[in-house]
Amino acid sequence: MRYCYLILLLPYYVLAAEPSQQRQQDLDNMLKHDCGSCHGLPPKGGLGPSLMPEALAGKSDDFLLQTIQQGRPGTAMPPWQNFLNKEETLWLIKLLRQR
Ligand code: HEC
């Protein structure tokens, strides 16, 4: 019986999990090098729009998640879903909102 609870709880922990310390470092580097090449460093805008907290303030996590995962067809914004899973993307959004 006890094992049933473990199995039920597992997806919750997987979803709530933040990327590991090492992965957070990789994501931070990615933001600087990959995203930075279009959005600037700090990401105040370049080819892509500003990703500074004030620019993202009115936009929902879902909307930004969708943009980063799928890209924006017909624009230079590429999809990142092969490189970033949902949790990693949400973590990046949180990071951008805090800077
Ligand atoms: C090749 C250039 C390029 C790269 C690399 C790039 N972007 Fe973009 N991004 C764009 C452009 C251009 C837009 C605006 C698309 C439009 O016109 O709607 C955009 C839009 C966005 C938006 C929506 C902003 C808003 O205000 O609606 C987010 C969020 C975003 N990018 C995040 C990222 C992240 C995170 C990365 C790195 C993982 C990244 N981008 C890498 C070009 C790029």
Image (cartoon, rainbow, N blue to C red):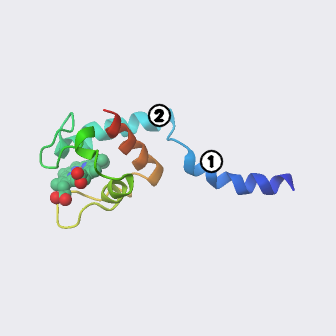
Point out which mark residue 22 bears: 2
7 lies above or below 54: below
Q: How many labels does the image show?
A: 2
Residue located farthest toward the right when viewing the structure as drawn? 1
Residue 64 in the image: state x and y as whole percent.
Answer: 32, 54
Q: Would you name the residue on which mark 1 appears? A: 13
Residue drawn at point x = 28 percent, y = 49 percent: 58
Q: Is residue 97 visible from the viewing direction of this image?
A: yes
Mark 2 Cα within 10 Å, few/some/many (few <14, many 20+)? few
Residue 7 in the image: state x and y as whole percent.
Answer: 73, 56
Does residue 78 appear to the left or right of 89 in the view shown?
A: left
Q: Nearer the viewer, residue 3 or 34?
A: 3
Three-letter amino acid code at the position of disc 2: Gln
Q: Is residue 52 visible from the viewing direction of this image?
A: no
Mark 1 Cα within 10 Å, few/some/many (few <14, many 20+)? few
Residue drawn at point x = 32 percent, y = 62 percent: 70
Q: Does the residue labelled 2 lie within 8 Å of ligand 1?
A: no
For the C terminus, the quadrant is top left
Residue 91 in the image: state x and y as whole percent.
Answer: 42, 43
Cα separation, mark 1 vs mark 2, equals: 19 Å
Circles 1 and 2: CB atoms closer than 8 Å:
no
For the N terminus, the quadrant is bottom right
